[in-house]
Image: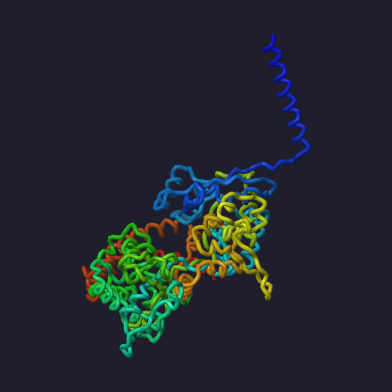
Amino acid sequence: MKRILYLIICMSILFATVACGSSDSEDTTSADTVSISYWIPVGEDSTYYMSYEENPGVKYLESLEYNGNKIDLSFMVPLSGSERDNFNTLLATEEYADLIDMAFSTTSATELLEDEVIYDLTPYMEDYMPNYMALLEKHPELKAYTYANVDGERRILQLYSITEEILGNFMGFLYRRDWVAKYGTHPTTGESFTYGFTDPNDKSTWEDNVVFPSGESEPVYISDWEWMFEIFNKAMADLGINDGYSFSPYFKGYNEDGALFSGFGGGTPLWYKDENGNAAFGGDSDSMRAYLQALNNWYEKGWLDKSFAEHTNDQVYAINTDLVHTGKVGMWIGRRAETGTQMDTGSEFTSGIVAYGARQPINDIYGSAEQQNKEPNSLYQYSRLRGSLVVSRKVAEEDLPTVLSFLDSLFTAEGGAILCFGLNKEQFEMTQDPTYIKYGLTEGAYQTEVLSDGSIKYNRDDSLLADNNLASAMAAKRMTIGYYAQGFVPALNASYIGYAQEAMARWDYYENQGYIERAVQTQFTTDESNTYNKVYANIDTFMASNIPQFITGKLDIDNDQDWEDYVTVLNKYSPEKVTQIFQRIFDSMK
């Protein structure tokens, strides 16, 4: 009986609780929560948090409402080095996310639409993404790239990150300025250079009076590079470095974005937009032959890494980093974190290292007049259309308004700042984020200042200026979609003081006009995409195996027969088919 009475009492309490809950819910409107999964190619260092769901910017965005609903973000992040394989595997197994970053896609958005993987967003844009549409109208020069051709109609299949200014590059040519100053002499007078830190206790105070053969204080021409390479050989001989070298090209022998190649008359080794706005192919050009004559000469003189073609797993900005970071390489493609004295570990060959950035060089030696004294016009450079994503059909149609409203919020200056900088003081005080508290960011990651001309200056916290990894972790920048407003770029560049800022100025000295933006490929039809993939795969395989042979001398670049044989086989793979596809798109955009 006692047990029965106890049960009755418990049931009475339970019903009362339910009744109270029902009464409260009738009086209080609570937002529904829409779960959103997001595939991003890069996560964050576990030093700061274990998963990207813990990112302070992400958590703040989850505290807001979109179309009357809250969101719950989760992230799918591949292992480093497996991004493309992971992307393709998820597509093949239909385990892809709601939002998919397209950075590693080998499939066009048009194909994904035909395969019913993604939504055609066109019908939803005016209602749920007014901020994004307003930006496209504001920038017609960008708008043309954001549409895909579907059955002759222009449709919005993917969303692009939009920036008002070109962001400072993260990589480029670096060279041992300390070696040039110490082992070089004035090219005209033969006098030794003076150099050193004006304040021995401040490694940002390096000064020298180095002059290159061009008469400039920095390398501008190929002749300046070759003068440097001689100096690097002298330095390595004096230091007893037997396994070092002056420079290492990418394992293919060229960079698809142009880079060093572009200084030999412009363009890229593959497809590019020429100075008249037409599509062109560089693999069989006179520029390619002049470029290979230069690299073969460098190889024969011992200036190149003899094993460059073996570094097939190295990123272009991280070629043979062990040798670079032990101070045995004169010039390399590196990152901001390698500029200045940052690689000085006090070891035998890094002690005293000072790394300077260099522009893409202008060829003044090789080939004919057509390949000489032309400024590079094709290079890796951040586009004003940065990343892109698609919305998959994993999202229920009734949830699309919430998902798109959330994405649209990132296309405001306030939303973009969360991705670029992190939380301001007001946003932190709303969330009391424990990560911000841990790293002393209770005043926010940044503050704004209105300048005399009415523009806004974004000032990062000093601790973030000194630590780029921390700065990245405190912002939601791994979600690459959003708006980078006017004023964001100077603040970004200001987060890299001294040597790094100067290096970025050199890496972006020339403006990319030839390297074709990925956005153009989204306008391929399915047949064009299939043609491109087939032709590209064949040409990439052929060139990546033959170009290094010209560099190492196994094929003679000065022998007309060797060159003609290479051109004949290359053209059997029909590069002109892809040239015609790009030309169709360029014509339609005009």
Please provide percent x and percent y for residue 170. Answer: 46, 66
Point 43% across, 67% down: residue: 171
Residue 260: image quadrant is: bottom left
Query: In which quadrant will I find the N terminus?
Result: top right
Q: Is residue 467 left or right of residue 399?
A: left
Please provide percent x and percent y for residue 149. Answer: 53, 59
Colour pattern: rainbow
Please provide percent x and percent y for residue 479. Answer: 54, 55
Residue 353: image quadrant is: bottom left
Q: Is residue 427 above or below residue 233?
A: above
Does residue 483 appear in the picture of this structure?
yes
- Residue reaching furthest bottom? 189
Does residue 248 appear in the picture of this structure?
no
Query: In which quadrant will I find the C terminus?
Result: bottom right
Q: Is residue 13 above or below residue 80?
A: above
Please provide percent x and percent y for residue 57. Answer: 59, 53
